[in-house]
Amino acid sequence: MANRNGRKDMSIPERKNNRGRIQIMGDVLGLATSGIRKTHIMYRANLSYEQVHMYLSELIERGLLEQHTTDEGVVYRATERGREFLYFYTKLVDFLEIPPHTSLEMPYLSK
């Protein structure tokens, strides 16, 4: 995309509150800790049919999710490795979260 000067705009595009791949994987694994069906994952994680298939396949391939067939249908459940991923993902999200009452003052800087 060119800017007003005719040069290519090299700025980083602003994300419009879209979730990234890792966040969606974390969301799906969080839903699957106690076992959940595909349609429930689709609705609760707000994923399309194509997206849910793509993420379930990737999570199963990586050993983070397993698929079980029951009398009620197919159920997806996070594996031990998936729960470990979720643990570290949650720690990272907590670490990066900005405290709600952050002061703009920087006490370590001299005035």
Image (tube, grey):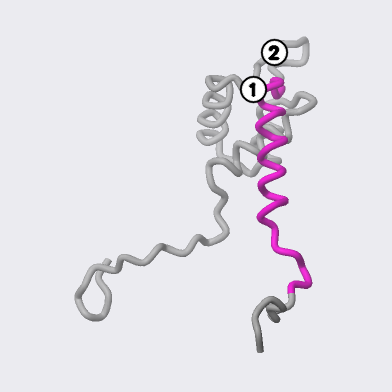
Looking at the rendered structure, the secondary structure element under dot 1 is strand
Q: Is residue 42 above or below residue 56?
A: below
Name the foreground residue: 47 vs 111.
111
x and y percentages locating residue 44 in the rendered image: 71, 41
The residue labelled by disc 1 is: 65
Question: Was residue 95 drawn as part of the magenta stretch in this picture?
Answer: yes
Q: Examine the image and state in which quarter residue 90 appears.
A: top right
Crowding at dot 2, Cα within 10 Å, few <14 / some 14-19 / many 20+, comes out as few
- Looking at numbered disc 2 in the image, what kind of residue is underneath it? His
- Residue at figure coordinates x 72%, y 51% from the top left: 94
x and y percentages locating residue 57 in the rendered image: 53, 24
Q: Examine the image and state in which quarter residue 3 appears.
A: bottom left
Q: Image quadrant for the N terminus?
A: bottom left
- Residue at figure coordinates x 60%, y 44% from the top left: 23
Name the foreground residue: 93 vs 47.
93
Tell me the tag on residue 34: none
Name the chief secondary structure element in magenta. helix
- Residue at figure coordinates x 55%, y 31% from the top left: 55
Number of numbered discs: 2
The residue labelled by disc 2 is: 68
Q: Is residue 19 left or right of residue 43?
A: left
Looking at the rendered structure, the secondary structure element under dot 2 is strand
Q: Examine the image and state in which quarter residue 101 appears.
A: bottom right
Of tags 1 and 2, which is closer to the observer? 1
Q: Is residue 106 above or below residue 15?
A: below
Magenta-colored span: 76-102
- Work out which residue is located at the far left of the displayed protein and give it: 6
- Looking at numbered disc 1 in the image, what kind of residue is underneath it? Leu
